[in-house]
Image (cartoon, rainbow, N blue to C red):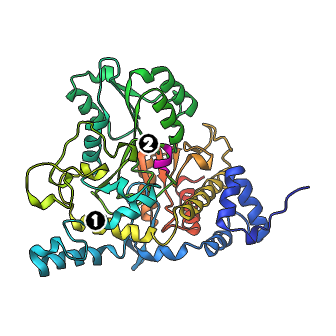
Amino acid sequence: MTQVHNFPEMSFSGLAKRMLEQSPQTVLRELSRSAKHDVISTAFARYLDEKDEMKQLKEEFVFPTYVSEGKEKKYICLSGNILGLQPKSAKPLVTAVLNSWANKGVECHFVDPLPAASCEKYVSQHLGKLVRAKSEQVVAMNTVDVDLHLMLVSFYQPTTKRHKILFDSESDYVNIAKSQILSHGFKVSESLVSAPYQDTSFCLDMDDLIDFIEQNGESIATILLPAILRKSGQFLDIERITRTGHKKGCMVGLVLNDAVGNVDLKLNEWGVDFACWDTGRYMNAGPSSMGCTFLHEKHSKNHFPKFTGWWSHQMSTRFEMTNELDRTPGVNGYKLSNLPPTKIAQIKAGLDIFGKISIEKIREKSILLNGYLETLLQLKYKCTEGYMDSDPIRMITPSNPSERGAQLSFKVKEDAKDIYEKLKKRGIICSFYSLDVLTVCPAPLYCGFQDVLLFVNALSEICEL
């Protein structure tokens, strides 16, 4: 007996679940028929926005503006994979911290809001929830590059037989890996190995990657991969990578710049050794934002080599100034100095918004948003499901919603930078990775279905598709 779905009553949760079982286009076509709207119509986009229980969160953000026909208008921002929007609460929080310094002087180290001597504890609990970890396993500190170096001091301990770092050749942290290798006296040409891409693919085949680790694991000291590939937006199977890496004796670390606040992460459950990320993208903490670090609880009392500072010391005895290190267990023992409360205020502003909605709900809306974007491109431009090279736009992000986050990337035949500039003149900001790859990221906290439709229509006009 065929199951009948009452689509108009189905929640985003139910729709997202169906998209993981069927293609987004199939689900949206059925939903549009039930709603009596054409999939590519404004009425259907408006219908989806009305059903969105997160739509009010859009009002929590400041949108950049432009002037058109003498009127100030808000940009549609589809560039959350590069930089998130500013929460409206960020400026008042930062101002309150500055006022505390002005009005309390040195006492601002120990009084609210966000006392300078312990401000990081005000965000640790929410940070832990975003990556499914305990608050004591996560800390905000430094920048992501510094944090990666600090963790690699502990988790990259090469020997003559096991000295390689497995990394992603499309990543932006290659110089960190190179300098770590050189600091131990090894050669980059022999110790830095790239995850295996197929010749014409922008994605990693998971079976090929796992086979590579199985075959080369005895010589790999540390696996250091992004959870989401920067160019294609592919969400890797971290649990499988971690399990295979550990079986071969490798340490497993992650770079989560494009993942935290975007996809559902279970770092503790998956057994990841460490992870680092910046907070400026999906966490909306601003440009040049602070980094964050996760350390698995099994390493809380590790005796690995590490760089330490004053703030590595236990808080209870930190100000006794004995010069005898009483190191804090876990990730907090990797802190070097007290954190800037103004930067913590920016992180807190973004986390306060995440506190109003679960990461599961965010993920469900994201699956619908980029499924809707993909479907519009397929229907409007007659792109095939498999995206052939002959198609005017070829999606290089995996078509399976479980293998991607909020970002979709497209290989275009025209100059991607030129397309970006023309979209901007129409009030839409996305991003481009290279001259032939356009990236579009409808971040679910502040983007809606009508935003996606306006983007697709504008792209159609620009590319004359």
Query: Please, what is the three-letter code of the amino acid marked with disc 1?
Result: Ile
Residue bearing the label numbered 2: 272
Q: Position of residue 140 (x, y in %)?
A: 30, 57
Majority SS type along the magenta span: helix
Residue 232 appearing in the image: no
Outermost residue to the right: 1
**Above or below — where is 452 with respect to 310?**
below
Circle nearer the viewer, 2 or 1: 2
Query: Alpha carbon of mark 2 to alpha carbon of mark 1: how far?
Result: 25 Å
Residue at x-position 68% and y-position 54% = 19
Image: magenta residue range: 266-270
Residue behind mark 1:
344
x, y percentage for residue 131? Answer: 45, 55
Res. 354 in view: yes
Splitting the image into 4 quarters, where does residue 183 fall? top left
> What residue lies at 70% left-to-right and 63% top-to-bottom?
39
State yes or no: residue 269 in magenta: yes
